[in-house]
Amino acid sequence: MNRVLVVGSGAREHSLAWKLMQSSAVDEVMCAPGNPGMAQLGECVSVNASDANAVADLADRLDASLVVIGAEDPLVAGACDAVRSRGRLAFGPSAAAAQLEGSKAWMKEVLLHAGVPTARHATFGATELDAALQYLADSADLCVIKTDGLAAGKGVIVAESMGEARAAVKRYLSGEAFGEAGQTCVIEERMTGPEISFFVLCDGERAFPMACAQDHKRVGDGDTGPNTGGMGAYSPVLFATPDLVEHLMVTAIVPTLAEMRARGAEFRGILYCGVMLTPNGPKILEYNVRFGDPECEILMRRLESDLYAHLSESAAGALQTPIEFGDNCAVGVVLAADGYPATPVKGDVITGIEHANEIDEVVVFHGGTAANPKGVTTNGGRVLVVTATAPDIPAAQAKAYAAAKLIDWPGMHYRLDIGSQAVV
Ligand code: AMP
Ligand code: GLY
């Protein structure tokens, strides 16, 4: 009996469970805590995903042969270390390696030592407000202010003015904005250019480039309004040529992995590299230590090789199976709750998911949903991700939007331009 445990409750984890179920090596997928979409694939059991020992206890109880951790919080809390200490395979980095996402200050230090092209930066702690304000005053360019610690994708302010930058630094260092996570902050040079998300599968030694996608981080059409966890994505990205991928492997990924190994933090799992193609060449914006959400959902729609083979080989430190994607294109549109990203409204009944799923090559993944006697209800900011595949991006886009139109609840909103950069 080969049972895989997927830890998480977002659309990313739903898509991983969905793809794992297609593997002939997998008998059963269980999800913790899961969501109503994942419950259609396998049993969902409750767990406090941020409690590493609770995750390992559950893996023991279910006798899971592989534990797949979707989100950054359990990884930073050491969920993979705990599972591995029980002699089980865990897909994802150790807590030490997850610092790459858990601390932006640490990540920047690694990049600097590894000689990886990235934005100029300085790090300041809670007692260094004067020095931080002086650094801003001395910077010729506009600045970006980031929390050192995790802030659910919302800890970055791309300041439009010196006044905004100064106000952000004050609110971060005082703890007013993000508590402890922001009391150490990174101030960096503001760069410009198109962004891509580049995913690399790693086993501690080897690194296999997987695919590129483009996310849409702002809440509104035309990249307006506040940053979110991501409002939609598409893949492949035409300008992410094989030459660019090779360049990123040589200038960024390989030196970063070597530097991490030298620091006793070898990286296993999926390395998510946020890249900006600046006028001075590609530069690394950030690393994340897990799949992107919603990028993962569209990659799972395009992946043709066996996800279980990839994840279990990464977990075992023995990457081998070649990663294969279809020639098709995928677009994923996030349907968000009223009030997202600030304060999403929960508890509204959702209609039309089944009709959307009936469209050929459309799959709707659940994120913030809950099962209720009245039906499936909204239970978070990013509620559903409607994905569609087709031979080209415009056709995938048209299909995803046709499916999105069939779904409804009060206050639902989504961007209308997901994938449009690829079409211009
Ligand atoms: P991060 O969470 O670090 O990826 O930042 C979120 C978003 O903020 C990125 O996707 C970029 O759009 C923007 N951003 C972050 N750092 C910079 C920078 N140094 N220059 C310009 N934009 C940035
Ligand atoms: N889509 C951006 C992220 O997962 O961080």
Image: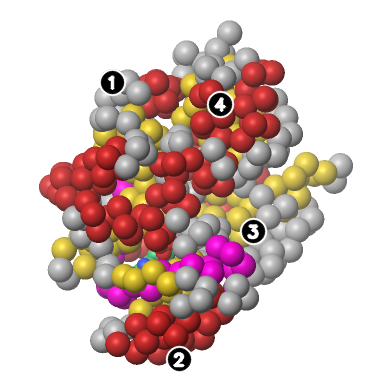
Residue 31: x and y, percent? 64, 30
Q: Label 2 near label 4: C-beta < 8 Å?
A: no
Disc 2 target residue? 163
Mark 1 residue crowding within 10 angstroms, few (<14) / some (14–19) / many (20+): few
What residue is pinned by disc 1?
320
Q: Which mark is residue 83?
A: 4
- What residue is shown at x 28% (from left), y 20% (from top)? 320
Label at residue 381: 3
Residue type, numbered disc 3: Gly
Three-letter amino acid code at the position of disc 4: Val
Which residues make up the magenta segment? 177-198
Residue in front for this viewpoint, 6 or 147: 147
Front residue of 417/175: it is 175
Q: Earlier in the sequence, mark 2 or mark 3?
A: 2
Q: Is residue 51 magenta?
A: no
Mark closest to the chain's N terminus, 4 or 2 = 4
Gap between marks 1 and 3, in whole Å?
Answer: 38 Å
139 on left or right of 176: left
Q: Nearer the viewer, mark 3 or mark 4?
A: 4
Residue type indicated by callout 2: Gly
What's under tag 1, amino acid-wise? Gln
Does residue 275 sit above or below 71 in this rendering?
Answer: below
Can residue 331 be seen here? The reply is no
Tell me the distance, in whole angstroms, between the alpha carbons under discs 2 and 3.
30 Å
**Which picture quadrant has residue 310?**
top left
**Residue located at (55% from left, 12% from top):** 2
Whole-Å distance between the Cαs marked 1 and 4? 23 Å
Between the residue at mark 4 and the residue at mark 2, the CA separation in whole angstroms equals 47 Å
- Nearer to us in this view, 174 or 142: 174
